[in-house]
């Protein structure tokens, strides 16, 4: 049996993921119906890990694109290249996934230019086509192709929004930080620390998340807690690890930094 053309993008090891509700069942239903999926949730809450996990469960290659301000349609679709043999067409990640039946994940899709997201429209409705106008090809998506996008709605007011004409083409899954006990279990597993320390780190996160009412854009993410746990495993004290992995990255404001430091101290008071 020949290898999948995108075998290099297949995950060999199961990515650890702790389900919060029924998101796995919803995603698998959407995949069976060939419906695109939109993931909404704060930074570092597990959206990317979720996509990696479902790709592994489905046994499908996963092509991930980190969207940014300069992302162009040709970055997604493809372009002509010049080499020693002449010119040749090279598919972009979206075209590759559509052609060969992979999952294509556009992380923080609202960061891409609005004219770029328009190319997604014919792929995310009943047509499931991708016009490659530059090479005069109409690409019909492979039956196994699925598009997944994510964004952080907390940033909408400050930065960009996803147009209703785009949003309404997707099945939505909303993510948030796990419940305290579940988040502690994730931090303990991923950071390879004991449960007691993981619970204290979660207490830090819960206190920082309450500071959103005082001007903090976002509280500590689960990802930050895992970084702090890893630092403690390599010899830093819990307070020092929280300073480097949580307090410093979260804010440059002196008053907020003081409040964050107080949240750390309160969590490790005993």
Image: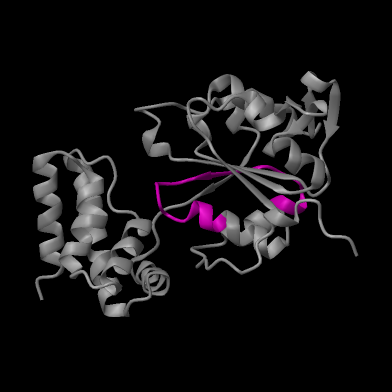
> Do we see residue 165 in this rendering?
no
User: In which quadrant will I find the C terminus?
Assistant: bottom left
The span picked out in magenta is 30-50
Is 6 a magenta residue? no
Q: Residue at x 65, y 62 (%)?
A: 11
- Residue placed at 38% from the left, 34% from the top? 155
Observer-nearest residue: 6 or 81?
81
Residue 89 appearing in the image: yes
Residue 31, percent from left and from top: 72, 52
Q: Quadrant of the N terminus?
A: bottom right
Q: How many marks?
A: 0
**Whole-percent x, y for residue 148 in the image:** 62, 44
Above or below — where is 58 with respect to 268? above
Q: How is the image coloured?
A: one colour
Q: Is residue 71 left or right of residue 96?
A: left
Q: Which image quadrant for residue 186?
A: bottom left
Is residue 24 shown left or right of residue 97?
left
Who is closer to the viewer here, 89 or 144? 89
| Horizontal arrangement in the rendering, residue 11 relative to residue 199 (left or right) | right
Residue 46 counted in the magenta span: yes
Picture layout, residue 161 above or below residue 145: above
Determine the image quadrant of residue 262: bottom left
Is 162 above or below relative to 134? below
Q: Position of residue 201 (x, y in %)?
A: 26, 66
Q: Tell me the residue at 26%/58% (across/down).
A: 205
Name the residue furthest front.
84
> Picture coordinates of residue 191 (x, y %)?
37, 70
Q: At 72% from the left edge and 61% from the top edge, which residue is drawn?
A: 58
């Amino acid at each position: 049996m020949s290898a999948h053309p995108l075998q290099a993008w297949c995950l060999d090891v199961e990515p650890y993921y702790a389900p919060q509700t029924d998101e796995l069942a919803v995603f698998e239903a959407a995949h069976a119906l060939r419906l695109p999926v939109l993931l909404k949730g704060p930074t570092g809450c597990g959206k990317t890990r979720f996509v990696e996990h479902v790709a592994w469960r489905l046994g499908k290659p996963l092509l991930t694109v980190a969207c940014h301000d300069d992302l162009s349609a040709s970055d997604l679709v493809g372009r002509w290249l010049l080499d020693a043999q002449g010119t040749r067409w090279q598919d972009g990640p979206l075209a590759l996934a559509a052609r060969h039946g992979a999952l294509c994940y556009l992380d923080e899709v609202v960061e891409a230019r609005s004219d770029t997201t328009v190319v997604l429209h014919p792929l995310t409705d009943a047509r499931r086509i991708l016009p490659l106008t530059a090479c005069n090809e109409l690409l019909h998506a492979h039956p196994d192709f699925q598009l997944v996008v994510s964004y952080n709605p907390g940033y909408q007011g400050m930065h960009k929004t996803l147009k209703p004409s785009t949003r309404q083409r997707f099945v939505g899954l909303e993510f948030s930080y796990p419940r305290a006990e579940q988040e502690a279990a994730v931090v303990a597993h991923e950071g390879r620390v004991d449960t007691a320390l993981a619970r204290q780190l979660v207490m830090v996160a819960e206190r920082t998340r309450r500071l959103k009412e005082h001007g903090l854009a976002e509280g500590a993410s689960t990802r930050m807690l895992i970084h702090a746990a890893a630092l403690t495993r390599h010899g830093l004290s819990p307070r020092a690890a929280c300073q480097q992995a949580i307090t410093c990255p979260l804010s440059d404001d002196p008053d907020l930094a003081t409040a964050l430091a107080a949240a750390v101290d309160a969590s490790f008071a005993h």
